[in-house]
Image (tube, rainbow, N blue to C red):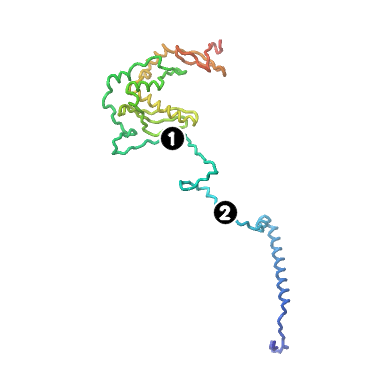
Amino acid sequence: MSSRSFRVTGRNLPPLSLRAAPPSFYTAAASQKNAIGRIARRHYSCHRLAFNPTSTLLAQQPLKPSSSKKAEQPSPTTTPISNGNTPSNSSKSPTIDIQDLTAGFADQTIVLDEGSRQVDWTRSFHGLSTEPFPKEVAEILTQPIPHEDVEVKPDGVIYLPEIKYRRILNRAFGPGGWGLAPRGETIITARSVTREYALIVLGRLVSVARGEQDYFSPENIPTAAEGCKSNAMVRCCKDLGVASELWDPRWVREYLDKNTKETFVEHVVTKKKKKITIRKDDKVRSPWRETKYTNGASA
């Protein structure tokens, strides 16, 4: 390496000799630099730990690689819907959705085509009052009700069982000659079931009425729906004159005076006493028994 002279501030400097450093010098400098870096990083980590130990420890933990075989979870706002092309998992037991009947049966009536020859009984009044029934049919429908067919409730209300209305219709028109057509969907409230029906006789409408029936638990809604249909039939029969005596107040009072009696009964378990009305030819049924009641005490 050649020597050179430099002139600084008007003075000559002695020649400076430049020599290359040995390789061991650079190795020692690099190791010293790495040691200084490690000390600085350790000091920085201790400083972070003093202010936020939780986040620092979590940050120092290595990340676990996610498995690519794990199925992605569906979003909670979406519900997967299976179709016929999706294979089902036979290892899992199928879930059965039980319908809540308190929301209704969703049994809307079917609307027929306007061009069809069939009669849409959901809105048609076809045949209403076109002609009277034959005399022999009218006699069956309006004949007096035998007293032995009339039943009495404990509160003194008299009624004719719905099965006897059906027997009168079968005698007048024959089985299959009459029917009930729904004219709307079933309406279910908090305590009752109601629906409108039309009484169809020999292909023509003769009466429309709305039936109703109370229920006490959701499990009894189907039974209440059947009772609602029978109640609508009884109300439709009023237009045909069937058992019209039961809606005559004077006839009802005379029937109660001649055929019923009031008696005190006692419950065999709770010993509760009350007064009920029964037919004179009937007797007190279990769990009640007849008793005497004088001045608030049994005698």
| Residue labelled with disc 1 | 105
- Furthest residue in direction left, as rendered: 131
Q: Is residue 160 above or below residue 114?
A: above
Label for residue 123? Answer: none
Give SS at disc 1. Answer: loop
Q: How far from the left and from the top, in percent, is residue 110?
A: 36, 37
Q: How far from the left and from the top, in percent, is residue 34?
A: 70, 69
Q: Residue at 31%, 33% (x, y): give it.
A: 124
Judge the density around disc 1: few (<14), some (14-19), many (≥20) Cα neighbours within 10 Å: some
Evaluate whether residue 9 shows in this view.
no
The quadrant of the rendering that contains the C terminus is top right
User: Callout 2, which amino acid?
Assistant: Lys
- Furthest residue in direction front, as rendered: 90
Evaluate whether residue 27 shows in this view.
yes
Q: Nearer the viewer, mark 2 or mark 1?
A: 2
Q: Residue at 48%, 36% (x, y): give it.
A: 100
The quadrant of the rendering that contains the N terminus is bottom right
In the picture provided, is 139 more to the left or to the right than 285? left
| Residue labelled with disc 2 | 69
Q: Is residue 204 above or below residue 16?
A: above
Q: Nearer the viewer, residue 132 or 292?
A: 132
Q: How far from the left and from the top, in percent, is residue 251?
A: 37, 15
Judge the density around disc 2: few (<14), some (14-19), many (≥20) Cα neighbours within 10 Å: few
Q: Nearer the viewer, residue 99 or 86?
A: 86
Residue 6, quarter of the rendered image: bottom right
Q: How far from the left and from the top, in percent, is residue 247?
A: 37, 19
Give SS at disc 2. Answer: loop
Q: Residue at 46%, 13% (x, y): give it.
A: 282
User: Callout 1, which amino acid?
Assistant: Phe
The residues bearing labels 2 and 1 have C-alpha atoms spaced at a distance of 45 Å
Residue 202, quarter of the rendered image: top left
First in residue order: circle 2 vs circle 1: 2
